[in-house]
Amino acid sequence: MSSITDTSGLTQLGAATALPASPDEAKLERVPNPHPALAYCIRFAAPEFTSLCPLTGQPDFAHLVIDYVPREWIVESKSLKLYLGSFRNHGSFHEACTVDIARRLVDTLDPAWLRIGGYWYPRGGIPIDVFYQTGAPPEGVWIPPQDVPGYRGRG
């Protein structure tokens, strides 16, 4: 059985698209879920996420893992990549970046469930991990562990 996804409203996929200057300018696009009657988990991992410290302007680095169970919509992956890339010149604390990404996805997709793990590399010698989820995951859906180890430095 084959599912065809309606891509008629997309503006970025299949076209040269510049990296947005900020998360507010980024256009997060969605497409209809090809399997809306099924409960399943979608995962995006962004192991090279970057943003800027809002005070020093120095770069911050994180490994983000986003899991969600869709309802009617799924995120279009190129728009997600561009949205996440728009944080490269955006000054924001780790907690704000992580939770803002989750809330924007929830606002755009209205998923049955969403969680994000923001595994941030040390700043000032202290790694900061930020976790957010919308509630308990739906029953019967396999939600694999994120399996991102805590920062251990050199060993």
Image (cartoon, rainbow, N blue to C red):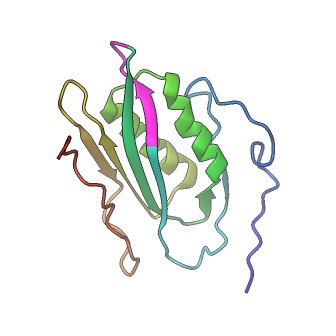
Q: The magenta stretch spans which residues?
A: 48-56
Q: Is residue 98 left or right of residue 127?
A: right
**Number of numbered discs:** 0
Q: Is residue 110 left or right of residue 144?
A: right
Q: Position of residue 44 (x, y in %)?
A: 49, 56
Q: Position of residue 1 (x, y in %)?
A: 73, 87
Q: Position of residue 114 (x, y in %)?
A: 42, 58
Is residue 8 shown above or below 118? below
What's the residue at 74%, 35% (across, down)? 17
Q: Position of residue 87 (x, y in %)?
A: 50, 30
Residue 36 in which image quadrant: bottom right
What's the residue at 71%, 30% (across, down)? 18
| Residue found at the far top of this picture | 56
| Residue found at the far front of this picture | 154
What's the residue at 36%, 21% (across, down)? 53
Is residue 74 shown in magenta? no
Residue 133 visible somewhere in the drawing: yes
Residue 23 visible somewhere in the drawing: no
Residue 34 in which image quadrant: bottom right
